Image (cartoon, rainbow, N blue to C red):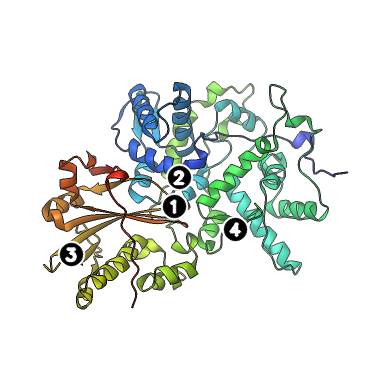
Amino acid sequence: MKKYYTIPEQDYLRIHFVRPRFKSNIENVLLYMANECCKITPCSRREYAEKINKAIRLFPGNAGLTQKTVDNWRTEISALCAFYNEDRISDITKTSRLSFFLNENQDLTQFFKFLMLSFQFPGGHIKPSDNVELINNGVRFKPAQFIIRVLLAGNKLLAEQGIEKEMSVSDEEATYCILNDLQVTTGKRPPEEVAEIILRNRKNKLSYYNRNDSRIFNSKGRPRTKGDVVRYAGDIMDYMEIASMLERRLDGYFILKPDSLPDITAFVQDTSYFGGYENYYDVENLTPAMLAPVEDNWFVYVNSLLDPEKFKTDIRALVSTSELEVVFNDRIAEIIESNSTTTKDIGNIGESIIFSHEKQRLKIAGYEELLHFIAIVDSPSYHPGYDIDSLEGDGTHHHRYIEVKTTISRQKINLYSFHMSTNEWYVAETHREHYCVYRLMLSASDKTLYVLRDPVALYKNDRISALPRNGMEISFDSSKFTPEKLLVWQD
Protein backbone atom coordinates (compact mmCIF):
# COMPACT_ATOMS: atom_id res chain seq x y z
CA MET A 1 0.00 0.00 0.00
CA LYS A 2 1.33 3.39 -0.99
CA LYS A 3 2.12 6.03 1.60
CA TYR A 4 1.50 9.67 0.77
CA TYR A 5 2.91 13.04 1.73
CA THR A 6 -0.04 15.30 2.57
CA ILE A 7 -0.21 19.03 3.09
CA PRO A 8 -2.42 19.76 6.13
CA GLU A 9 -5.79 21.14 5.02
CA GLN A 10 -5.24 24.48 6.74
CA ASP A 11 -1.94 24.94 4.88
CA TYR A 12 -3.13 23.95 1.42
CA LEU A 13 -3.63 26.62 -1.25
CA ARG A 14 -3.31 25.65 -4.88
CA ILE A 15 -1.43 28.41 -6.69
CA HIS A 16 -2.11 28.79 -10.38
CA PHE A 17 -1.47 31.37 -13.09
CA VAL A 18 -1.84 31.98 -16.81
CA ARG A 19 -0.53 29.06 -18.82
CA PRO A 20 -0.03 30.13 -22.45
CA ARG A 21 -1.54 28.01 -25.19
CA PHE A 22 1.70 28.43 -27.11
CA LYS A 23 3.94 27.11 -24.33
CA SER A 24 5.31 24.27 -26.49
CA ASN A 25 6.61 26.89 -28.93
CA ILE A 26 7.05 29.76 -26.49
CA GLU A 27 10.49 30.92 -27.60
CA ASN A 28 9.53 31.37 -31.25
CA VAL A 29 6.23 33.00 -30.32
CA LEU A 30 7.77 35.54 -27.94
CA LEU A 31 10.48 36.60 -30.38
CA TYR A 32 7.85 37.01 -33.09
CA MET A 33 5.42 38.91 -30.87
CA ALA A 34 8.12 41.20 -29.48
CA ASN A 35 9.00 42.13 -33.05
CA GLU A 36 5.34 42.72 -33.93
CA CYS A 37 4.73 44.84 -30.82
CA CYS A 38 7.70 47.01 -31.69
CA LYS A 39 6.02 47.89 -34.98
CA ILE A 40 3.00 49.40 -33.22
CA THR A 41 3.05 53.05 -32.23
CA PRO A 42 1.08 54.23 -29.16
CA CYS A 43 -2.65 54.09 -29.83
CA SER A 44 -5.97 53.40 -28.14
CA ARG A 45 -6.38 50.13 -26.27
CA ARG A 46 -8.90 48.91 -28.84
CA GLU A 47 -6.69 49.76 -31.84
CA TYR A 48 -3.63 48.18 -30.21
CA ALA A 49 -5.59 45.00 -29.46
CA GLU A 50 -6.76 44.81 -33.07
CA LYS A 51 -3.19 45.11 -34.35
CA ILE A 52 -1.95 42.46 -31.91
CA ASN A 53 -4.78 40.15 -32.94
CA LYS A 54 -3.81 40.57 -36.59
CA ALA A 55 -0.18 39.71 -35.79
CA ILE A 56 -1.26 36.63 -33.82
CA ARG A 57 -3.27 35.34 -36.80
CA LEU A 58 -0.24 35.81 -39.06
CA PHE A 59 1.94 33.56 -36.90
CA PRO A 60 2.46 30.22 -38.73
CA GLY A 61 -0.40 27.83 -38.08
CA ASN A 62 -2.75 30.42 -36.55
CA ALA A 63 -4.88 31.39 -39.55
CA GLY A 64 -7.79 29.21 -38.45
CA LEU A 65 -7.87 30.24 -34.77
CA THR A 66 -11.21 31.29 -33.33
CA GLN A 67 -11.56 34.86 -32.11
CA LYS A 68 -11.73 33.62 -28.53
CA THR A 69 -8.41 31.78 -28.90
CA VAL A 70 -6.77 34.85 -30.46
CA ASP A 71 -8.02 36.99 -27.57
CA ASN A 72 -6.65 34.43 -25.12
CA TRP A 73 -3.25 34.54 -26.86
CA ARG A 74 -3.22 38.32 -26.52
CA THR A 75 -4.12 38.17 -22.82
CA GLU A 76 -1.54 35.47 -22.14
CA ILE A 77 1.24 37.36 -23.92
CA SER A 78 0.44 40.48 -21.92
CA ALA A 79 0.19 38.65 -18.58
CA LEU A 80 3.33 36.57 -19.02
CA CYS A 81 5.68 39.05 -20.67
CA ALA A 82 4.34 42.58 -20.11
CA PHE A 83 5.04 43.34 -23.78
CA TYR A 84 2.78 46.39 -23.69
CA ASN A 85 1.36 48.75 -21.09
CA GLU A 86 -2.32 49.70 -21.04
CA ASP A 87 -3.04 53.05 -19.41
CA ARG A 88 -6.64 52.82 -18.23
CA ILE A 89 -6.88 56.57 -17.58
CA SER A 90 -5.64 57.85 -20.96
CA ASP A 91 -6.89 54.75 -22.83
CA ILE A 92 -3.51 54.59 -24.58
CA THR A 93 -1.48 51.41 -24.99
CA LYS A 94 2.27 51.54 -25.55
CA THR A 95 4.80 48.85 -26.39
CA SER A 96 6.96 48.20 -23.32
CA ARG A 97 10.69 48.32 -22.70
CA LEU A 98 10.68 44.53 -22.30
CA SER A 99 9.40 44.11 -25.84
CA PHE A 100 12.00 46.45 -27.32
CA PHE A 101 14.68 44.83 -25.20
CA LEU A 102 13.95 41.32 -26.45
CA ASN A 103 13.52 42.43 -30.05
CA GLU A 104 16.80 44.29 -30.16
CA ASN A 105 18.92 41.92 -28.05
CA GLN A 106 17.48 38.62 -29.34
CA ASP A 107 18.66 36.91 -26.17
CA LEU A 108 15.83 34.75 -24.84
CA THR A 109 17.98 33.30 -22.09
CA GLN A 110 18.63 36.73 -20.62
CA PHE A 111 15.01 37.77 -21.18
CA PHE A 112 13.63 34.81 -19.22
CA LYS A 113 15.96 35.56 -16.34
CA PHE A 114 14.28 38.97 -16.01
CA LEU A 115 10.85 37.33 -16.23
CA MET A 116 11.70 34.91 -13.45
CA LEU A 117 13.23 37.70 -11.35
CA SER A 118 9.91 39.57 -11.37
CA PHE A 119 7.65 36.50 -11.14
CA GLN A 120 5.92 36.66 -7.76
CA PHE A 121 2.66 36.01 -5.93
CA PRO A 122 0.61 38.14 -5.72
CA GLY A 123 1.37 39.74 -9.07
CA GLY A 124 -0.16 41.40 -12.08
CA HIS A 125 0.36 38.29 -14.21
CA ILE A 126 -2.66 36.57 -12.63
CA LYS A 127 -6.35 37.48 -12.29
CA PRO A 128 -7.34 40.01 -9.60
CA SER A 129 -9.69 37.38 -8.09
CA ASP A 130 -6.74 35.01 -7.64
CA ASN A 131 -4.71 37.81 -6.08
CA VAL A 132 -7.54 38.39 -3.59
CA GLU A 133 -7.26 34.77 -2.47
CA LEU A 134 -3.47 35.02 -2.17
CA ILE A 135 -3.64 38.25 -0.16
CA ASN A 136 -6.35 36.93 2.14
CA ASN A 137 -4.07 33.97 2.92
CA GLY A 138 -0.99 36.13 3.51
CA VAL A 139 0.99 34.88 0.51
CA ARG A 140 4.19 36.73 -0.39
CA PHE A 141 6.29 34.48 -2.60
CA LYS A 142 8.91 34.47 -5.36
CA PRO A 143 8.99 30.88 -6.67
CA ALA A 144 12.12 30.97 -8.86
CA GLN A 145 14.24 32.42 -6.08
CA PHE A 146 12.87 29.94 -3.53
CA ILE A 147 13.43 26.90 -5.78
CA ILE A 148 17.06 27.94 -6.26
CA ARG A 149 17.50 28.31 -2.51
CA VAL A 150 16.01 24.84 -1.93
CA LEU A 151 18.45 23.30 -4.40
CA LEU A 152 21.40 25.12 -2.84
CA ALA A 153 20.29 24.04 0.64
CA GLY A 154 19.89 20.47 -0.59
CA ASN A 155 23.38 20.48 -2.07
CA LYS A 156 24.74 21.56 1.31
CA LEU A 157 22.79 18.85 3.15
CA LEU A 158 23.96 16.11 0.78
CA ALA A 159 27.57 17.29 1.08
CA GLU A 160 27.35 17.22 4.88
CA GLN A 161 26.08 13.64 4.65
CA GLY A 162 28.98 12.68 2.39
CA ILE A 163 26.67 12.01 -0.55
CA GLU A 164 28.33 12.93 -3.84
CA LYS A 165 25.37 13.98 -5.92
CA GLU A 166 23.45 17.16 -6.66
CA MET A 167 20.14 18.09 -5.10
CA SER A 168 17.27 17.76 -7.54
CA VAL A 169 13.56 18.49 -7.49
CA SER A 170 10.66 17.10 -9.52
CA ASP A 171 7.49 18.90 -10.56
CA GLU A 172 5.55 16.86 -7.96
CA GLU A 173 7.97 17.77 -5.19
CA ALA A 174 7.88 21.43 -6.17
CA THR A 175 4.06 21.32 -6.23
CA TYR A 176 3.41 19.65 -2.88
CA CYS A 177 6.47 20.75 -0.92
CA ILE A 178 6.73 24.32 -2.22
CA LEU A 179 4.09 25.91 -4.44
CA ASN A 180 0.86 24.71 -2.76
CA ASP A 181 1.99 24.88 0.87
CA LEU A 182 1.09 28.07 2.71
CA GLN A 183 3.86 27.39 5.21
CA VAL A 184 6.24 28.07 2.32
CA THR A 185 4.41 30.75 0.34
CA THR A 186 3.80 32.87 3.44
CA GLY A 187 7.47 32.71 4.44
CA LYS A 188 7.06 30.52 7.53
CA ARG A 189 9.09 27.57 6.25
CA PRO A 190 12.67 28.25 5.05
CA PRO A 191 14.32 26.57 2.04
CA GLU A 192 16.57 24.47 4.29
CA GLU A 193 13.54 22.83 5.89
CA VAL A 194 11.91 22.18 2.52
CA ALA A 195 15.08 20.49 1.24
CA GLU A 196 15.08 18.27 4.35
CA ILE A 197 11.42 17.34 3.77
CA ILE A 198 12.02 16.42 0.12
CA LEU A 199 15.02 14.24 0.95
CA ARG A 200 13.19 12.59 3.86
CA ASN A 201 10.16 11.86 1.67
CA ARG A 202 12.41 10.14 -0.86
CA LYS A 203 14.04 8.08 1.86
CA ASN A 204 10.62 7.02 3.16
CA LYS A 205 9.38 6.43 -0.42
CA LEU A 206 6.35 8.66 -0.02
CA SER A 207 4.12 9.40 -3.03
CA TYR A 208 2.60 12.76 -3.87
CA TYR A 209 -0.48 11.74 -5.79
CA ASN A 210 -3.50 10.48 -3.86
CA ARG A 211 -6.68 9.70 -5.79
CA ASN A 212 -8.69 9.78 -2.56
CA ASP A 213 -7.77 13.41 -1.95
CA SER A 214 -10.81 15.57 -2.72
CA ARG A 215 -8.52 18.42 -3.75
CA ILE A 216 -7.77 16.66 -7.04
CA PHE A 217 -11.27 17.51 -8.28
CA ASN A 218 -11.86 20.71 -10.23
CA SER A 219 -14.65 23.24 -9.72
CA LYS A 220 -16.98 21.14 -11.88
CA GLY A 221 -16.42 18.03 -9.81
CA ARG A 222 -14.33 16.33 -12.45
CA PRO A 223 -11.09 14.66 -11.37
CA ARG A 224 -7.94 16.49 -12.34
CA THR A 225 -5.21 14.50 -14.01
CA LYS A 226 -1.78 14.33 -12.43
CA GLY A 227 -0.54 16.72 -15.12
CA ASP A 228 -3.20 19.30 -14.24
CA VAL A 229 -2.13 19.31 -10.60
CA VAL A 230 1.62 19.67 -11.10
CA ARG A 231 1.78 21.67 -14.33
CA TYR A 232 2.19 25.08 -12.68
CA ALA A 233 5.34 24.13 -10.79
CA GLY A 234 6.51 22.39 -13.96
CA ASP A 235 5.94 25.57 -15.98
CA ILE A 236 8.00 27.66 -13.58
CA MET A 237 10.90 25.22 -13.77
CA ASP A 238 10.56 25.00 -17.57
CA TYR A 239 10.92 28.79 -17.73
CA MET A 240 13.92 28.59 -15.43
CA GLU A 241 15.39 26.02 -17.81
CA ILE A 242 14.93 28.40 -20.76
CA ALA A 243 16.72 30.98 -18.60
CA SER A 244 19.63 28.51 -18.21
CA MET A 245 19.25 28.45 -14.44
CA LEU A 246 17.96 24.89 -14.18
CA GLU A 247 18.75 21.78 -16.17
CA ARG A 248 16.33 18.90 -16.65
CA ARG A 249 17.89 15.46 -16.21
CA LEU A 250 16.81 12.45 -18.24
CA ASP A 251 14.68 11.26 -15.31
CA GLY A 252 12.70 14.53 -15.41
CA TYR A 253 14.20 16.00 -12.23
CA PHE A 254 15.67 19.50 -12.25
CA ILE A 255 19.09 20.49 -10.93
CA LEU A 256 20.95 23.81 -10.88
CA LYS A 257 22.44 24.57 -14.28
CA PRO A 258 26.20 23.99 -14.35
CA ASP A 259 28.29 27.12 -15.07
CA SER A 260 25.43 29.43 -14.01
CA LEU A 261 26.71 30.27 -10.54
CA PRO A 262 26.99 34.07 -11.08
CA ASP A 263 23.33 34.38 -12.13
CA ILE A 264 22.19 31.93 -9.46
CA THR A 265 24.02 34.01 -6.84
CA ALA A 266 22.39 37.17 -8.20
CA PHE A 267 18.97 35.55 -7.82
CA VAL A 268 19.64 34.45 -4.26
CA GLN A 269 20.85 37.90 -3.26
CA ASP A 270 18.13 39.83 -5.09
CA THR A 271 15.81 41.86 -2.85
CA SER A 272 13.48 43.29 -5.48
CA TYR A 273 9.78 42.83 -4.76
CA PHE A 274 6.64 44.53 -6.01
CA GLY A 275 4.95 46.05 -2.99
CA GLY A 276 1.86 47.39 -4.71
CA TYR A 277 -0.39 44.93 -2.91
CA GLU A 278 0.93 45.53 0.60
CA ASN A 279 -1.80 47.98 1.63
CA TYR A 280 -4.50 45.40 0.89
CA TYR A 281 -3.48 42.63 3.30
CA ASP A 282 -5.52 44.04 6.17
CA VAL A 283 -8.51 45.13 4.08
CA GLU A 284 -11.74 43.38 5.00
CA ASN A 285 -14.04 42.21 2.19
CA LEU A 286 -11.32 42.72 -0.40
CA THR A 287 -12.66 42.56 -3.97
CA PRO A 288 -10.96 42.12 -7.39
CA ALA A 289 -12.13 45.59 -8.41
CA MET A 290 -10.07 47.11 -5.61
CA LEU A 291 -6.92 45.48 -7.02
CA ALA A 292 -7.47 46.35 -10.69
CA PRO A 293 -5.65 49.73 -10.50
CA VAL A 294 -2.55 48.00 -9.15
CA GLU A 295 -1.99 46.14 -12.43
CA ASP A 296 -0.73 49.24 -14.26
CA ASN A 297 1.94 49.74 -11.58
CA TRP A 298 2.85 46.05 -11.84
CA PHE A 299 3.78 46.35 -15.52
CA VAL A 300 5.84 49.46 -14.80
CA TYR A 301 7.67 47.55 -12.06
CA VAL A 302 8.44 44.53 -14.27
CA ASN A 303 9.91 46.76 -16.96
CA SER A 304 11.91 48.72 -14.39
CA LEU A 305 13.99 45.63 -13.56
CA LEU A 306 15.62 45.65 -17.01
CA ASP A 307 19.36 46.13 -16.98
CA PRO A 308 21.18 45.35 -20.27
CA GLU A 309 24.37 44.64 -18.34
CA LYS A 310 22.73 42.08 -16.06
CA PHE A 311 22.31 38.37 -16.81
CA LYS A 312 24.26 38.53 -20.08
CA THR A 313 24.24 35.07 -21.59
CA ASP A 314 27.32 32.96 -21.06
CA ILE A 315 27.64 30.64 -24.06
CA ARG A 316 28.93 27.89 -21.74
CA ALA A 317 25.44 27.72 -20.25
CA LEU A 318 23.95 27.16 -23.71
CA VAL A 319 26.34 24.71 -25.33
CA SER A 320 28.87 22.41 -23.72
CA THR A 321 32.49 23.50 -23.60
CA SER A 322 33.66 20.32 -25.29
CA GLU A 323 31.36 20.95 -28.26
CA LEU A 324 32.56 24.51 -28.65
CA GLU A 325 36.17 23.49 -28.48
CA VAL A 326 35.56 21.08 -31.34
CA VAL A 327 33.19 23.17 -33.43
CA PHE A 328 34.12 26.77 -32.74
CA ASN A 329 37.80 26.89 -31.95
CA ASP A 330 40.30 29.71 -32.35
CA ARG A 331 38.93 32.98 -30.90
CA ILE A 332 35.80 31.32 -29.51
CA ALA A 333 37.75 28.71 -27.58
CA GLU A 334 39.50 31.54 -25.75
CA ILE A 335 36.10 32.96 -24.71
CA ILE A 336 34.87 29.63 -23.47
CA GLU A 337 37.98 28.98 -21.40
CA SER A 338 37.57 32.29 -19.56
CA ASN A 339 35.84 31.90 -16.20
CA SER A 340 34.77 35.53 -16.00
CA THR A 341 34.10 36.73 -19.53
CA THR A 342 30.62 36.36 -20.99
CA THR A 343 29.94 36.45 -24.71
CA LYS A 344 28.62 40.00 -24.67
CA ASP A 345 31.60 41.27 -22.70
CA ILE A 346 33.71 40.89 -25.85
CA GLY A 347 30.98 42.04 -28.18
CA ASN A 348 28.85 39.04 -29.05
CA ILE A 349 29.35 35.32 -29.48
CA GLY A 350 27.81 35.69 -32.93
CA GLU A 351 30.59 38.02 -34.00
CA SER A 352 33.18 35.47 -32.90
CA ILE A 353 31.45 32.67 -34.78
CA ILE A 354 31.19 34.77 -37.95
CA PHE A 355 34.80 35.87 -37.54
CA SER A 356 35.75 32.19 -37.60
CA HIS A 357 33.39 31.60 -40.54
CA GLU A 358 34.90 34.42 -42.58
CA LYS A 359 38.46 33.20 -42.05
CA GLN A 360 37.55 29.75 -43.29
CA ARG A 361 35.50 31.16 -46.22
CA LEU A 362 38.47 33.16 -47.52
CA LYS A 363 40.82 30.26 -46.92
CA ILE A 364 38.63 27.97 -49.04
CA ALA A 365 38.47 30.68 -51.72
CA GLY A 366 42.28 30.70 -51.88
CA TYR A 367 42.96 33.98 -50.08
CA GLU A 368 44.68 32.70 -46.98
CA GLU A 369 47.35 35.39 -47.29
CA LEU A 370 44.64 38.05 -46.71
CA LEU A 371 43.17 36.64 -43.51
CA HIS A 372 44.89 39.28 -41.41
CA PHE A 373 42.61 41.89 -42.97
CA ILE A 374 39.51 40.37 -41.31
CA ALA A 375 38.70 42.23 -38.12
CA ILE A 376 35.95 42.54 -35.55
CA VAL A 377 35.24 46.26 -35.36
CA ASP A 378 35.18 47.20 -31.69
CA SER A 379 34.97 50.87 -30.83
CA PRO A 380 34.07 52.06 -27.31
CA SER A 381 32.90 55.46 -28.57
CA TYR A 382 30.78 54.69 -31.65
CA HIS A 383 29.38 51.91 -33.80
CA PRO A 384 30.48 52.18 -37.46
CA GLY A 385 27.33 50.44 -38.67
CA TYR A 386 28.78 46.95 -38.99
CA ASP A 387 30.51 44.39 -36.76
CA ILE A 388 33.11 42.74 -38.98
CA ASP A 389 35.30 44.12 -41.75
CA SER A 390 36.01 41.26 -44.15
CA LEU A 391 36.84 40.80 -47.84
CA GLU A 392 34.69 39.57 -50.72
CA GLY A 393 37.20 36.93 -51.79
CA ASP A 394 36.35 37.27 -55.47
CA GLY A 395 39.62 38.66 -56.79
CA THR A 396 38.55 42.31 -56.48
CA HIS A 397 39.89 42.88 -52.94
CA HIS A 398 36.64 44.69 -52.16
CA HIS A 399 35.73 44.87 -48.50
CA ARG A 400 32.66 43.06 -47.18
CA TYR A 401 31.01 44.93 -44.31
CA ILE A 402 29.14 42.51 -42.07
CA GLU A 403 26.49 43.28 -39.49
CA VAL A 404 25.83 40.22 -37.31
CA LYS A 405 22.32 39.70 -35.93
CA THR A 406 22.31 36.83 -33.46
CA THR A 407 19.51 35.13 -31.58
CA ILE A 408 20.46 32.97 -28.59
CA SER A 409 17.96 30.39 -27.38
CA ARG A 410 17.70 27.02 -25.65
CA GLN A 411 15.77 25.40 -28.51
CA LYS A 412 15.89 25.86 -32.27
CA ILE A 413 14.50 29.23 -33.32
CA ASN A 414 12.73 30.01 -36.59
CA LEU A 415 12.58 33.77 -36.45
CA TYR A 416 13.31 35.66 -39.62
CA SER A 417 13.23 39.21 -38.32
CA PHE A 418 15.65 41.61 -36.67
CA HIS A 419 16.25 45.29 -35.97
CA MET A 420 18.68 47.56 -37.82
CA SER A 421 19.59 50.89 -36.28
CA THR A 422 19.36 54.13 -38.23
CA ASN A 423 23.14 54.19 -38.56
CA GLU A 424 23.30 50.56 -39.75
CA TRP A 425 20.67 51.25 -42.42
CA TYR A 426 22.54 54.39 -43.53
CA VAL A 427 25.83 52.48 -43.81
CA ALA A 428 24.03 49.72 -45.71
CA GLU A 429 22.79 52.35 -48.19
CA THR A 430 26.35 53.65 -48.55
CA HIS A 431 28.08 50.30 -49.20
CA ARG A 432 25.16 48.60 -50.98
CA GLU A 433 26.28 45.24 -52.48
CA HIS A 434 29.30 45.11 -50.15
CA TYR A 435 27.13 45.32 -47.04
CA CYS A 436 25.76 42.06 -45.65
CA VAL A 437 23.58 41.16 -42.70
CA TYR A 438 24.49 37.75 -41.28
CA ARG A 439 21.37 36.44 -39.52
CA LEU A 440 22.64 33.83 -37.08
CA MET A 441 20.34 31.71 -34.91
CA LEU A 442 22.06 29.75 -32.16
CA SER A 443 20.62 27.05 -29.95
CA ALA A 444 21.97 24.03 -28.13
CA SER A 445 20.96 21.80 -31.04
CA ASP A 446 21.18 24.01 -34.12
CA LYS A 447 23.20 26.80 -35.70
CA THR A 448 21.55 28.45 -38.73
CA LEU A 449 23.01 31.25 -40.85
CA TYR A 450 21.36 33.41 -43.52
CA VAL A 451 23.33 36.02 -45.46
CA LEU A 452 21.31 39.01 -46.69
CA ARG A 453 23.46 40.94 -49.16
CA ASP A 454 22.54 44.58 -49.75
CA PRO A 455 19.45 44.77 -47.52
CA VAL A 456 18.46 48.14 -49.01
CA ALA A 457 18.21 46.63 -52.50
CA LEU A 458 16.40 43.58 -51.12
CA TYR A 459 13.85 45.92 -49.57
CA LYS A 460 13.39 47.99 -52.73
CA ASN A 461 12.91 44.78 -54.73
CA ASP A 462 10.32 43.47 -52.26
CA ARG A 463 12.45 40.50 -51.19
CA ILE A 464 12.42 41.59 -47.55
CA SER A 465 10.08 43.77 -45.53
CA ALA A 466 11.27 46.85 -43.65
CA LEU A 467 9.26 49.05 -41.33
CA PRO A 468 10.77 52.31 -40.03
CA ARG A 469 11.17 52.46 -36.24
CA ASN A 470 14.36 54.03 -34.90
CA GLY A 471 15.95 52.49 -37.96
CA MET A 472 14.29 49.52 -39.63
CA GLU A 473 12.40 46.44 -38.43
CA ILE A 474 13.44 43.80 -40.98
CA SER A 475 11.64 40.54 -41.72
CA PHE A 476 12.12 38.03 -44.53
CA ASP A 477 10.62 34.85 -45.91
CA SER A 478 13.03 31.98 -45.32
CA SER A 479 11.74 30.20 -48.44
CA LYS A 480 13.29 32.96 -50.57
CA PHE A 481 16.76 32.53 -49.09
CA THR A 482 19.04 29.53 -48.77
CA PRO A 483 20.85 29.05 -45.46
CA GLU A 484 24.61 29.29 -45.66
CA LYS A 485 26.81 26.49 -44.38
CA LEU A 486 28.39 27.74 -41.18
CA LEU A 487 32.11 27.29 -41.62
CA VAL A 488 34.66 26.62 -38.91
CA TRP A 489 38.20 27.93 -39.03
CA GLN A 490 40.71 25.13 -39.36
CA ASP A 491 44.45 25.73 -39.16
The residue under label 1 is which amino acid type?
Answer: Ser
Circle 1 — which element? loop
What residue did someone put label 4 on? 256
Viewer-proximal residue, 64 or 123? 64
Q: CA distance from mark 4 to mark 3?
A: 45 Å
Q: SS at mark 4?
A: strand
Which of label 4 and label 2 is nearer to you?
2
Residue density around tag 3, few if under 14, some if 14–19, many if 20 or more, within 10 Å? some
Percent coordinates x, y for residue 130 in the rendering: 60, 29
Question: Which residue corresponds to the image point at 53% horizontal and 42% vertical from the top-left?
Answer: 119
Residue shown at 28% from the left, 46% from the top: 419
Expressed as whole percent of the image width and height from the top left, the position of residue 368 reads 23, 76
SS at mark 2 in the image: helix
- Verify CB contact (< 8 Å) between mark 2 and mark 1: yes
User: Residue 410, position in %: x, y?
Assistant: 48, 53
State how far apart marks 2 and 3 are (Cα).
Answer: 35 Å
Residue matched to label 2: 27
Q: Earlier in the sequence, mark 2 or mark 3?
A: 2
Q: Is 129 rendered above or below residue 275? A: above
Distance of label 4 from label 2 (alpha carbons): 21 Å
Q: According to the image, label 1 marks what residue?
A: 409
Which of the pair 197/164 is nearer the observer?
Answer: 164
